[in-house]
Image (cartoon, rainbow, N blue to C red):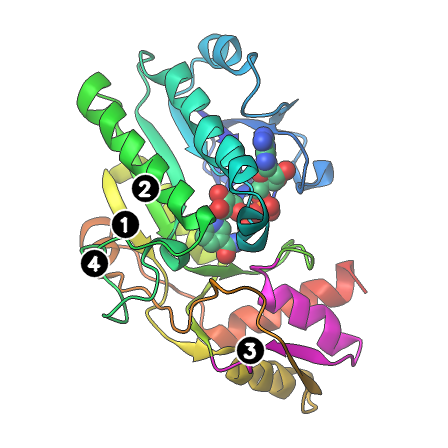
Amino acid sequence: MKVVVTGGAGFIGSHLVDSLLARNYEVVVIDNLSTGVRKNVPGRAKFHKLDIRSNKIRPLLKKISPDYVCHLAAQVSVTASQADAAQDADINILGALNLAEAVKTLPIKKFLFASSGGAIYGEASLIPTPESEPAEPLSAYGLAKYTVERYLDYYEKTFGLPVGVARLSNIYGPRQLTSAESGVVSIFSQKILRDEELPLHGGGEQTRDYLYVADTVGGIVSLMENGRGVYNFGTGIEISVKELAKVMGQIVGRPPRVAYAPPRSQVELGRSALKCDQARKDLNWRPQTKLEQGLHLTLDWFKKEVL
Ligand SMILES: NC(=O)c1ccc[n+]([C@@H]2O[C@H](COP(=O)([O-])OP(=O)(O)OC[C@H]3O[C@@H](n4cnc5c(N)ncnc54)[C@H](O)[C@@H]3O)[C@@H](O)[C@H]2O)c1
């Protein structure tokens, strides 16, 4: 079985590639290395340094003729999407459509799309938020993710393309870049180990649902293999950024030095957590990694690889 993973040199994508190889899939990575790192891609996976918007994508996918496509390549910064919504849409909407056009008439088993449970629901009235809540994205990034979801529904209805949408919460773990704005855990990991101040943007009262990357990949693989439709993947547990800093301080054995900083963007959510009963029920998926355990593993990786 052959799987194409776009964004496979990135944080989540590279863990997905590892997991697919361990399950004996043949893996082909497509990534332009804009934020991804070549050494994240294991030698056993084929690698194409290519932009998902390229006109080489359609002949390449036809030639590969994959069983599955997992589309994770994206412009991932909410702030960048606010600075230039056209640039964000070019990558996140038109790039996804280029891939969907490439496979719409191929006999693939699933087109899996990494969407965002954090950005799609906006400031939700129900927390933890189930998939049935209306999509009210506040950011251009969230709007693009939702637009692609709607397009994939069109491809499914019109061309019979089997689609799985994974709405991910805030994912953390080894290999997450410290420059990515979504990576509060990675930014805090590096700073706390260097005994630097942790910035609490907007006061740090905002809550997030932190899901460890191995659990995320488990969800993506089970949706790819067994599911169809839209699924949230998170823990359902809200934790404030301030509280996160405290827990990380307990793990490293000294209270963190924190510094209050201005909000990162006007579209930063106050609260966010995802209800994942659907994935539990249909896919028999549940997170296995407690926050403290995941933070331990992440901090250990940063100690070894980054410091
Ligand atoms: N990290 C999170 O908390 C989170 C939450 C919700 C959704 N997501 C989604 O999961 C996916 C993976 O995110 P990540 O955190 O691993 O980010 P990442 O930046 O580590 O990975 C993205 C990958 O896509 C590649 N890429 C970007 N633009 C490309 C293009 N035009 N053509 C080809 N490759 C391109 C990058 O080089 C990188 O390897 C993204 O779709 C993101 O929107 C992530």
Q: Earlier in the sequence, mark 3 or mark 4?
A: 4
Specify the amino acid type for callout 4: Glu
Q: Secondary structure at mark 2?
A: strand
Mark 2 lies on residue: 165
Q: Residue at x 43, y 13 (%)?
A: 65
Q: Which numbered disc covers residue 81?
A: none
Residue 252 in the image: state x and y as whole percent.
68, 83
Neighbourhood count class around disc 3 (C-alpha, 10 Å): few under 14, some 14–19, many 20 upward? some
The alpha-carbon separation of the residues under discs 2 and 1 comes to 6 Å
Mark 3 lies on residue: 202
Question: Can you see residue 14?
Answer: no
Q: Earlier in the sequence, mark 2 or mark 3?
A: 2
Q: Secondary structure at mark 3?
A: loop
Q: Nearer the viewer, residue 16 or 153?
A: 153
- The nearer-to-camera label among 3 and 4 is 3
Count of marks placed on residues: 4
Q: Earlier in the sequence, mark 1 or mark 3?
A: 3
Callouts 2 and 1 close, C-beta under 8 Å: yes
Q: Secondary structure at mark 4?
A: loop
- The nearer-to-camera label among 2 and 4 is 4
Mark 4 lies on residue: 133
Specify the amino acid type for callout 1: Tyr
**Is 255 positioned to the left or the right of 65 in the image?**
right
Mark 1 lies on residue: 231
Q: Quadrant of ligand 1?
A: top right
Q: Which residues are magenta?
A: 181-205
The alpha-carbon separation of the residues under discs 3 and 4 comes to 26 Å
The alpha-carbon separation of the residues under discs 2 and 3 comes to 31 Å
Q: Residue at x 43, y 67 (%)?
A: 269
Q: Earlier in the sequence, mark 2 or mark 1?
A: 2
- The nearer-to-camera label among 1 and 3 is 3
